[in-house]
Image (cartoon, coloured by chain):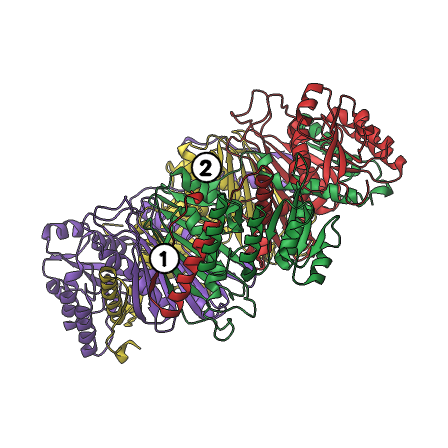
Chain colours: A purple, B yellow, C red, D green
Amino acid sequence: MHGNEPLGIAVIGTGRMGADHMRRIDRVISGARVAAVADTDAERARAVAAGIDGCTVHTDPAAAMAAAGVDAVLVASPGPAHEAALLAAFERDLPVLCEKPLTPDAASALRVVEAEQALGHRRVQVGFMRRYDAEYVRLKTLLETGQLGRPLMLHNRHRNVASSPFFTSSMLITDSVSHEVDVTRWLLGQEITAVTVHAPASSSGAPDGLRDPQFVVLETDGGALSDVEIFVNCGFGYQVQAEIVCERGTARVGDGHHLVAQAAGRWGGTITQDWTERFAQAYDDELRAWVDTTRRGEVGGPSTWDGYAAAAVCEAGVRALEEGGRVEVELAEKPALYG
Amino acid sequence: MHGNEPLGIAVIGTGRMGADHMRRIDRVISGARVAAVADTDAERARAVAAGIDGCTVHTDPAAAMAAAGVDAVLVASPGPAHEAALLAAFERDLPVLCEKPLTPDAASALRVVEAEQALGHRRVQVGFMRRYDAEYVRLKTLLETGQLGRPLMLHNRHRNVASSPFFTSSMLITDSVSHEVDVTRWLLGQEITAVTVHAPASSSGAPDGLRDPQFVVLETDGGALSDVEIFVNCGFGYQVQAEIVCERGTARVGDGHHLVAQAAGRWGGTITQDWTERFAQAYDDELRAWVDTTRRGEVGGPSTWDGYAAAAVCEAGVRALEEGGRVEVELAEKPALYG
Amino acid sequence: MHGNEPLGIAVIGTGRMGADHMRRIDRVISGARVAAVADTDAERARAVAAGIDGCTVHTDPAAAMAAAGVDAVLVASPGPAHEAALLAAFERDLPVLCEKPLTPDAASALRVVEAEQALGHRRVQVGFMRRYDAEYVRLKTLLETGQLGRPLMLHNRHRNVASSPFFTSSMLITDSVSHEVDVTRWLLGQEITAVTVHAPASSSGAPDGLRDPQFVVLETDGGALSDVEIFVNCGFGYQVQAEIVCERGTARVGDGHHLVAQAAGRWGGTITQDWTERFAQAYDDELRAWVDTTRRGEVGGPSTWDGYAAAAVCEAGVRALEEGGRVEVELAEKPALYG
Amino acid sequence: MHGNEPLGIAVIGTGRMGADHMRRIDRVISGARVAAVADTDAERARAVAAGIDGCTVHTDPAAAMAAAGVDAVLVASPGPAHEAALLAAFERDLPVLCEKPLTPDAASALRVVEAEQALGHRRVQVGFMRRYDAEYVRLKTLLETGQLGRPLMLHNRHRNVASSPFFTSSMLITDSVSHEVDVTRWLLGQEITAVTVHAPASSSGAPDGLRDPQFVVLETDGGALSDVEIFVNCGFGYQVQAEIVCERGTARVGDGHHLVAQAAGRWGGTITQDWTERFAQAYDDELRAWVDTTRRGEVGGPSTWDGYAAAAVCEAGVRALEEGGRVEVELAEKPALYG
């Protein structure tokens, strides 16, 4: 890839997650394009690739990686297919974003580690997306300042409305708690050394035979504890919460607020200092909406009339400020053009 | 513009706001590119255009609009220059995103309204970006369900840390309250008919002679009231809050939570139902980070080792679940590659 | 009254408020007793005085004040009867707690002021009970530290589920906003100099002809503003909220939290430092419950069995701490006595 | 005890807790008086009994219980002295409020259980005061409605600023977690069957050798789990929090809010429906303040002038409502009497 050319990506796997990543590459973020897709289900692959200029369709991941214009690989196929796809990418020395889990078990994951070592440089980013969540990032940033002291305990809640039909008791750990495993390692910068699982009587809302909820206690080589409530049929919502307890205070995220810290006799959070921070997302969305409607040949959003009405009201407001009392607003008649 | 070609945009004005919009077009959102820029300060224009492929630089807005590849115009020049830029865009019948204010006064704004009418179709989206803020959008959506009944009052707070040196008492209304003027009109779908301004003794934190804070009461043709605390030298943070009071309940945004409603004896909000909603932004940011580092030839984020460690911990967890008790985690030695 | 004798109180008026105060004197607080009651409705007075030892019943307030053992007067009759009751109490130089309003209008209130002056010393405490609310007290305490700077604005919300059938538009001010009038004067330590009332179109939830809600703006001789949303048929709950905006920060109460302050880039509150503070009320209620059940010859609350079970679990816990692993709890069989 | 006579209480132990209970009996709640005190430290007993009419002083608990006018016993001596005091009270068949712990170990507690059984009726209320905390009571009430379904897990946090110098690792369980042991049994109505203690590396804020914090997992005979973070040297505050996780929702207390529940896609709490509920405590405190100042021959609180000023402002408000616009308030000159 050269200069300002967008990054050409081969997407391996076009199920729910793969298709969603393709939408992101195509419609949301700048600087990348889907150059090729591969799926064992060729029809599904063709369907999702249909609207994308110059995107070739394959059933073999390696073929997709070899296609013209491919600079990088996004692996979103089922877990058991990851090892082969990763090794194929390593053969072409291509950068990879690999959805979690890296592979379904430790032995195969270790083979991937060894293959990347053989390559001699890192090529893989694993899809632990919580590391990119704004609240978790703020939590990590706060921890790194050291102002709360050394972390002692991390309390995690992970709740889903309902589990998929094929979910098993061990998948609560391998599919769900695996996120908290990474969060614990990443936030604390420590390896996990032991696991205890406490399982209360299962909820009557869980499918027959599924041990749900479970309560997992992780110990780390830094002497910290991380406990995880995992409850995949809680019925009421999707919730991911974390509270870190340090020597001099605590901080929590995922509670509907942003980060809330407790230290030195006070609880609370920080206040945005700037409109560019508070409305950053609104500006992005405004511009994206304008570009999208304009490309479709349409016009939307606040109209010229809205701009005029605001000006007229502000003029009356300035008079009210200067002269005191109540000032009436006079508007021209609204043209039909503005509905 | 044709097919999948990105939208070519002429950016008029390359100050703080213009440059920030250019960054968004170039780096953040998909489907658009900066094709031309215009600024009376040619040097500044050249500087911000430097890194952008095929972006031509102009001092005359009309010349920028006439440049090759220009499909649409973004006006981010100072307010007094807007009218001329808008009329120039109308001459070429180009779609425009015009930063607020549309123009600095009602008379000139009305001239733009009339020019767009002469054109016969809407071409302008005005930059009232709060209409794109997720919290305000949720507030409007809730109002439109009708479940809270007819809106009676809207309480607004608008606070800045400190005002610019050149800020005048009337600019609290024309530059700041103008946002609440639009929010009031948009949320209620009503025109504003009268304005009263109450001004307490000014804060000692405000520059000499500036009437700050002010308290503005707007009346609408639907019989609603909208009050605005505007305080541009509050010192402690940037805050934009709104509470709508309806016949059967209230709802507020901007409080650090998302939308909080009160009705039928209860206060509270909704819980996300799905990880795609809760982590939508994290997925976008993850992919953007990967594309950006990859284009720079770098590798970041969670590593293969992180994927392996998670697999090993989960395997121990499954054993702990199945066998009871505490299970120790066994990890291979960590290769130097993973730092 | 002498030494440890309880204060003998004559209660004037035995309607809802009077009867509730009698319950408080008789059952809740220490050091006082109802010595006499007066009500024009003799039957009602007799009924509420029935269970109280040595409480005499009168139709004439002055007679009640003259009864044996009366040391002080609590006036809870309708507002128009207050002036006469207060003057009667002044004649006997008795201390008075007078429910709000002092009297229904400024002229009669001024006559009471003059009569108390003639007496030469203060005898009256007016029933503005918000000054005794823990949250308002914390707000006032915070203001008095000066750390937020001079107060500029006070935003008040005052909402009732529904108004009484006889409520009139002016009673929203005289009966409801009168609380915020006192709160404004008390919190700011300033007199109110002017009033503006903005009234939106009335809610369809309000009785025909009632101007509800109203929005009142008070100005003070210290240059502060205090605005009040009064909405007596809001339907969803009873809410009393206040946010003070000062030169360097804000603080609010009544929001379901305790006091929440904003200053210097942070929002939040304080954390209790001590269990005596956190559970002060629980200790009072525990002891009151024990005294009340014991006086009735009953036994309630946590039992000896609960004390034993806790001891047994804690013993197992100490072993689990010392020896590691999971320790089972062994309990004796539960005697029938403990249900 | 007969009729309206206050309950005469013998207080055993006049340390911090005993003295505080004496203050409550004497000054706060109605219907009880301290008739006798006993303490091995006779001087301390005399000192705290000094201001109380007719309170006799003893060094032997049994003597205090035998004193004239004693109807009931409050045991607040150190835990090892409880068994003897309880047996002495049983001999006189007196009702007892016994501070926690009932006794320091399960064997002695069981002896008390057996002695009470021999008596044939319950005589003891144990001082687990959290059962009287308004938030815990609301949590239990909510659980009993069954609307959240069966309880599965209870997450508890229990944090103290700093521990006493004599605190040992096992006292974190026997003195602190004992509260959560009772809360778990009481909220769930289940007995605890097993305990596991996880102890992270101790905080550097804890005294040398103290295992602090600890993380305790309790299992119940109903198949529920209750986990407890106990951290007695957290440094930043005193916090007691509980979140119950049920089959269809969760509810938590102790978070600065009142009870917050999550169910059916929503989070939030209830809104007070009535001023008698919202300001119940303020009314109690107002009346108590008036009684206390009056008994001291003083006058405090809102004055006649405050009542007059409110009336004058409300009159101006009514005019502003009826006539529109801004109405100035006219006040008489303030008499010196009102400071």
- Letter of the chain that mark 1 sits on in the rendering: C
* Residue appearing at x 25%, y 74% in the figure: B331
Q: Nearer the viewer, residue B149 or B130?
A: B149
Taking the image as shown, residue C269 lies to the left or right of residue D302, namely left
- What x and y, as percent, mark residue C108? 80, 28
- What x and y, as percent, mark residue C11? 73, 30
Q: Which mark is residue C3?
A: none
Q: Nearer the viewer, residue B23 or B105?
A: B23
2 and 1 marks on the same chain: no
Mark 1: amino acid: Glu
Residue pointed to by mark 2: B114
Mark 2 and 1 residues: CB-CB less than 8 Å, in contact?
no
Q: Nearer the viewer, residue D295 or D302?
A: D295
- What x and y, as percent, mark residue D44? 70, 61
* Residue appearing at x 10%, y 53% in the figure: A42
Is residue A40 depicted above or below A205 in this figure? below
Residue A185 visible somewhere in the drawing: yes
Residue D143 position by quadrant: top left
Label 1 sits on a secondary structure element that is loop
Taking the image as shown, residue B114 lies to the left or right of residue C213, namely left
Q: Quadrant of the C terminus of chain C?
A: top left
Q: Quadrant of the N terminus of chain C?
A: top right
Is disc 2 surrounded by few (<14), some (14 to 19) or many (20+) residues within 10 Å?
A: some
* Residue appearing at x 50%, y 55% in the figure: D240
Label 2 sits on a secondary structure element that is helix
Numbered disc total: 2
Residue D216 position by quadrant: bottom left
Residue pointed to by mark 1: C330
Residue C218 visible somewhere in the drawing: no
- Letter of the chain that mark 2 sits on in the rendering: B
Task: State the separation of the CA atoms marked 2 and 1.
Answer: 87 Å
